[in-house]
Image: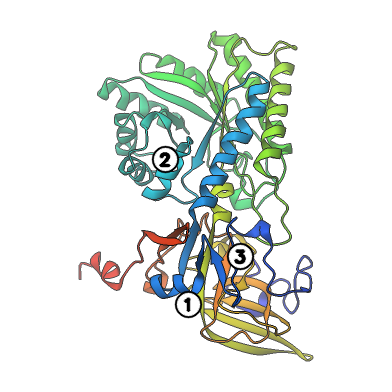
Amino acid sequence: MRAHEAGALHAEGYGGPPHWLPWPTDVMELLPQLWPQTIGRDDAGRLTVGGVDVATLAREHGTPAYVVDEADFRARARAFQRDFAAPFADHGIGVDVFYAGKAFLCTAVARWVAEEGLSLDVCTGGELAVAQRAGFPGERIGFHGNNKSVAEIRQALASGVGRVVVDSFEEIERVASVATDLGVRAPVMVRVTVGVEAHTHEFIATAHEDQKFGFSLAGGQAAEAVRRILAHGEVLDLRGLHSHIGSQIFDTAGFEVSARRLIGLHADVAREHGVEMPEMDLGGGYGIAYTSEHTPLGPGALGAQMAALVARELKVVGNGAGPAMMPRISIEPGRAIAGPSTFTLYEVGTVKDVDLGGGALRTYVSVDGGMSDNIRTALYDADYSCTLASRRSDAPPRLARVVGRHCESGDIVVMDEYLPADIAPGDLVAVPGTGAYCRSMASQYNHTPRPPVVAVRDGTSRVIVRRESVEDLLALDVG
């Protein structure tokens, strides 16, 4: 990890910019691939989004704050729905888009997802409770998790979820027992580890064999899971197979191998048991641009490529004819919808130049948030970009490191970025791409209240998740 726990002097790449960060010709330029669709600057150089400038947002809602462009979020959701449905339909295959709630979920977002026609993937009873509060249709909810409690399984089945993705032999028995108690037939899918390791960080690559999720395909566990589910046919309805090969993926090569192996198992189940499962879920993990280094595929390219590879593999398995029943395909984008729709707005508290020796300086820009609102830099070695948001500057670029206010040397928000050399306390800076896995992974480290989530649209802003207060922190402390 470059954000080394022993301190910045141990960081990889210490002393200079990374290879992908060029000297900017315009340090105030906004790269469109990093920001929500309605982003811009007004005549004073202030960042605007959804028709609202950041100075107004800071004054009305404080900093730090997550600012989500509602129109952008909805547009990205619609794009996945549209750009996957059409190419799959050309091959006679239906498709469902499940928004991965773990990326970021609150009542308002669940309603946006429902209104745009997507389904919803949840992985805890808490996420399911948010969906229920939003009135999300139960049949359009999928329930994940590698260690669901009996109470969570009961909550899911009682609310009529459309699928429970089982992850272990113990869980098969657990779901069967709860379904028997409730007098229902539980719709289940088998999570399969297909032996594909996406080119991503080790901690978020989830389909290789040596990890906690699912049933191994190579070891025969997946086939055994199918047999055990079918043995409980009176209370378990086997809907299909599920896989997820990782996160922050920039091409579809891994999905091709995953689809081939899932379709092979699908065909084996039909031959051995006479069961044509109606669904198949290829997971999500589609990447976004956090910096100029990243070049993700858009929904249009993803949809066309995914449809082509699935159709091709279905025909190969069926010797040109395909299975008797074409399974309905599901995908699960989360980051690709939520991530670019949101940026985090901070206020600069201090600016410090540190002599690195040999005439080199490091500029440390400290902001009023940090690893409690964005743990990904420290946890995943993630790179982010940022920009001066509150004013225009004609000062030359200076390489800076944006750091947080927490008592950790690894509390780094943006490892390397060029900011105007006149950056100063009181300025606002904005970090794009923070809509996924930032608020959802936020903590109260150092007893820091978590920031609000503010939605902007058509020149207005509204709080959809309020800022925590000191009273909230103390409420659980029984003394």
User: In the rendered structure, which disc, 2 or 1, sits on the residue that comes first in sequence?
Assistant: 2
In the rendered structure, the answer to whether residue 15 lies left or right of residue 40 reads: right
In the rendered structure, the answer to whether residue 41 lies left or right of residue 128 reads: right
User: In the rendered structure, which disc, 3 or 2, sits on the residue that comes first in sequence?
Assistant: 3
User: The residue under label 2 is which amino acid type?
Assistant: Asn
How far separated are the C-alphas under marks 2 and 1?
36 Å
Q: Secondary structure at mark 3?
A: strand
How far separated are the C-alphas under marks 1 and 3?
23 Å
Residue that carries the numbered disc 1 in the rendered image: 368
In the rendered structure, the answer to whether residue 392 lies left or right of residue 62 reads: right
**Residue in the image at 65% along x and 84% along y:** 363
Residue that carries the numbered disc 2 in the rendered image: 147
Q: Is residue 237 above or below residue 132?
A: above
Q: Is residue 310 above or below residue 476?
A: above
User: The residue under label 1 is which amino acid type?
Assistant: Asp
Outermost residue on the left side: it is 479
Viewer-closest of 315 and 208: 315
In the rendered structure, the answer to whether residue 467 lies left or right of residue 5 reads: left
User: The residue under label 3 is which amino acid type?
Assistant: Gly
Residue that carries the numbered disc 3 in the rendered image: 40
Viewer-closest of 384 and 36: 36
User: In the rendered structure, which disc, 1 or 3, sits on the residue that comes first in sequence?
Assistant: 3
Colour scheme in the image?
Answer: rainbow
